[in-house]
Amino acid sequence: MLTFTLRRIASGVGLLIVISALAYTLLFFSSSSIARNILGDQATPEQIALKEAELGLDQPLLVRYLGWVGSALQGDLGRSWFNGEPVTETIQSRLPVTLVLMIVSIVLVAVIAAVLGVLAAVRRGWVDQTVQVGAVIGDAIPGFVLAIFLVTIFAVNLGWFPAVATIRPGAGAEAWIVSLTLPVIAIVVNYVTSSAQQIRSAVIKELEKDYVRTLRSRGLSEREIVLRNVLRSAAPAGLTVLSLQFIGLLGGVIILEQVFAIPGIGALAVNATVLSDIPLVMGVVIITVVIVMIVNLLVDIAQGALNPKVRLS
Amino acid sequence: MKSTTKLIGALAAGALLLSGCSAGGSDAGAGTSDGGDDATRGGTLTLGQLGDVVSWDPSQAHVGHQFVPYQLVYDTLVLREPDGELSPMLATEWSYNDDRTVLTLELRDDVEFSDGEPFDAEAVVANFEHFKAGNGRQAVQLTQYESATAVDEDTVEITLAQPDPAFEFYLSQAAGLMASPAAIEAGTLETDPVGTGPYLYDADSSVRDSQSVFTAKEDYWNPDLQKFDTVELRILEDLSARANAIVSGQVDWTTLDARTADQAEGAGMEIIPDYQVDWTGVTFFDRDGTINPALADARVRQAINYAVDRETLLEQLQLGRGTATSQVFGPESGAFVEDLEDYYTYDPDMARELLADAGYEDGLEITLPVIDGFATQITAIAQQLSEVGITVNQVSAVPADYVADAVQGKFEAFNFNLFQGEAWVAVNQIIAPTATYNPFQTTAPELEELIAVVQEGGEDSEAAAQDINRYVTENAWFLPLYRIDQISVYDPEAITVEAQIQSAMPSIYNFAPAE
């Protein structure tokens, strides 16, 4: 298990290097006049040249990238080109908001999807049909449409929740709860049906296997069979879906954060990219990749724990 | 592992593709007002802002929406009233010498910066030098500035290279913001503003691009300008977030568009009436035909002006919230000419005739860069122009580079919302050979003569400004469509707010708690 984990981490680091280099190169070509955008439309050519030198834009791309890697390795992601704030500080203040939103959502999705999926597989009939239809609808409605719908009803018309987030540094739990409830509901509704669908299929597939028949013939109750054996075998499929959804959420929260004005990493990413604030964009890219790697690693470890065969492959 | 790799790749690519997101929109500005009579203050003012300030350094201050945050923490030398009149603020009085090249300011002697530094003549000099060196978004405000000298502790003499009729106005704007010289020296203003203003920035409660919190400063020298205990700026870039926030009572004021305005009005919000700041339309940069020879012919530019149906565009794009016009100067600018309002009527036949005269009876092509915020408008214009044989090539532009590329002369023309300020300000922004939005420096001798008269600022200045307006309208330097109604929405139960002439957002001093 340890070698397996170490191997995974090593390949992750390699991937991080590749992605950071790729991102850095792409960003380099994304904006032609960064110095001018920083200084404003009145800037003189001399001023622009000076700024470019200051930002190292006159250096070859490789030199700049290596310089960035050098400081990044020491934990310094540089300062925003536009407002001078340290990138790590900015990310530290924004990341928890996004992570809480994502983790709470995905845990709820996991629990609800597992219950629905197993019920649909075991009971079939109307439960099954509802889950199936729900999966289609849940997939079809974009999260932000749902979010706008929820805001209009529960925030604007009924006033139960704030229409835009009230989270701020040092805000109490209440601010977090009322601010994140609607976005979490939007995510859960959007994601739960398709995961339930996956879990349902996995459970059904397991139920058709020979060992289930054997267990049944030994007189074990259906409930015991499902909870002890089938679920364990079907879990890897569910975990895979959930990890994919969690990673997909990293992109999905960007729009939700805009709609609810949540001070998370998504809104930051949008602003930074619009401005071509390269240090900040790189910071967001790196942290995003690291999150993806951690999620994948955790899922792999969980899979390994559930099914020893995975460790060998 | 393979699928993981793919996923991460897709994700990173997705993050990068976000650079395609748009920031388009309007820029406008001016601002500052009177304090009213009541010195009582109280409550919290929450404003739904379009975007965060880029830097708290006043040398990087902008106009309109982006100027108001600076007013919270910094005072300006001169106060601009809601009607545009200039009043004393940190400067108690000011006067020019005879040839209007030396401006003498008398300063208040009872004001301190929030770090305890005294506000005095040396501080003013330091700020001018800093603003000049900072070369920020409004660097144009100190174009004519040469030097400043502290005559004594509370007198400053400013020397100008040439007369600048807008200079006093600029002292109520970005160039007039005063920061602590110690903080300028320390280079910390970007993230830590230190001024003499009515409020203090609460960095610990603020989150960049999300919210900025300010608390009233005790013993502020002018309590009339300090009407709230706390001011919060909520950064709500998303239009529907702003609409939801004002309708649900989370912000007291925000700015909306024509469509969301109806929803807000339905919910009991009020819109500041008769409030126009920007004109929208196309600026023909390439009037000498460097990129597109056709645009060098005034008849072609006039034909384009006759080929668009302004009233229909206003109705469709803006739900009628605006005023169709053929001129780029606003009613309060001093350069406004009533009969130029409908100088170009919708007349496709006239357009075709002019095109034929210019030798383009078989049609011609113009190229317009497109960013999200203006895509619909450009498509509508293109559709109307196609009916007289003009093909508009729509080329996608990078939103972050749109203005920068425009002012560097990379486009032959572009569509934008532009500010309608004082005549001299507008001349410097869009008409003079040195103007920001005249990248090919097109000009004409008669025009330069008129500009020189306006710059002298004498009795003939207003007539000359109107002649400039006539010249650029008749020669079709622009394709103005309409002046846009500024949708400045507030909750009348919570606050009162007064419009600020020529500013996209009312000055912070114009907000007061509801009676």
Image: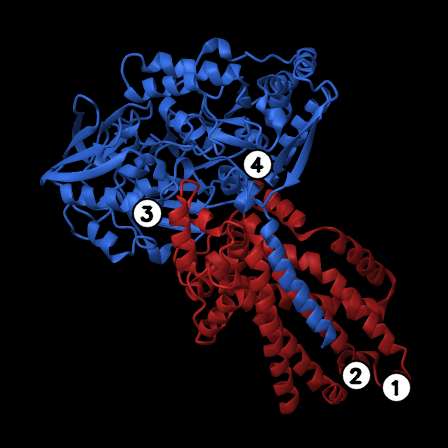
User: Which x, y percent locates residue B372?
Assistant: 61, 40
Disc 1: which residue: A211
Question: What is the spatial separation of the Cα atoms under label 4 and label 1, in whole angstroms?
Answer: 72 Å
Quadrant of res B375: top right
Q: Which chain comes out blue in the rendered image? A: B
Quadrant of res B447: top left
Numbered tag placed on residue A229 in the rendering:
2
Q: Report the residue at 41% width, 52% height from top.
A: A49
Q: Nearer the viewer, residue A98 or B25?
A: B25
Q: Secondary structure at mark 2?
A: helix
Q: Few, some or many C-alpha atoms within 10 Å of disc 3 (few <14, some 14-19, many ≥20)? A: some
Taking A105 as reference, is A280 left or right? left
CB contact under 8 Å: marks 2 and 4: no
- Chain letter of disc 1 in the image: A
Q: Few, some or many C-alpha atoms within 10 Å of disc 4 (few <14, some 14-19, many ≥20)? A: many
Question: What is the spatial separation of the Cα atoms under label 3 and label 2, in whole angstroms?
Answer: 70 Å
Q: Few, some or many C-alpha atoms within 10 Å of disc 2 (few <14, some 14-19, many ≥20)? A: some
Vertically, is B402 above or below A281? above
